[in-house]
Image (cartoon, helix red, strand yellow):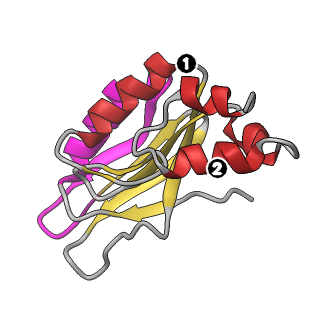
Amino acid sequence: MQVTPFLWIQHPVDEAVEFYIRLFPDAQTLDGPHVSEHMSSATIALGGQTLHIFNAGTYRELTEAFSLMVTCSTQEEIDRLWEALGDGGTPSRCGWVTDRFGITWQIIPEKLQEWLADPAHGHEVTRVMLDMVKLEIGPLQAALED
């Protein structure tokens, strides 16, 4: 058994696949893109996660209620992904950005969950994070010392 997110976008699937394959270093196309007059689809792998991307018109719409979380080990990785996904997209709070294809991403430091769970300083990390749009590792780490 395998669970695969099925993302119905309102944009050309082939353009989305090309964008994601260029953006993520280990990305690969597993199937497609298959493009016809009434629908298009492709299956890709990003960071070891299989995603099926589909477009058959405007019958369904993605929301921020579903997002893909990417953990990054450096600020440079966060900056690169944030800039690329935000180009033509919509940034939100706390590291969330909806890209130009309507898919929402959370671009976070790999240790964020650990920092938030810190019994002595997690509340301060949360406070700092809530004031951010793109997450910055330096201020979040500094909150651990306050």
Position in image of residue 62 (x %, y %): 36, 69
* Residue neighbourhood size for the residue with mark 2, other residues' Cα within 10 Å, grouped as few (<14), some (14–19), many (≥20): some
Mark toward the viewer: 1 or 2: 2
Residue found at x 47% / y 63%:
6
> Which three-letter amino acid code belongs to the residue tagged 1?
Thr
Residue under label 2, please give it.
126
Residue under label 1, please give it.
74
Q: Which residues are magenta?
A: 12-40
In the figure, 73 relative to 49: above or below? above
In the figure, 129 relative to 109: above or below? below
Q: Is residue 126 left or right of residue 23?
A: right
Position in image of residue 112 (x %, y %): 67, 38
Tell me, yes or no, whether the highlighted magenta stretch contains residue 30.
yes
Q: Quadrant of the N terminus?
A: bottom right
> Would you identify the image quadrant in which residue 124 lies?
top right
> Would you identify the image quadrant in which residue 61 lies?
bottom left
Q: Earlier in the sequence, mark 1 or mark 2?
A: 1
Q: Residue furthest bottom?
A: 59
Q: Is residue 44 left or right of residue 33?
A: right
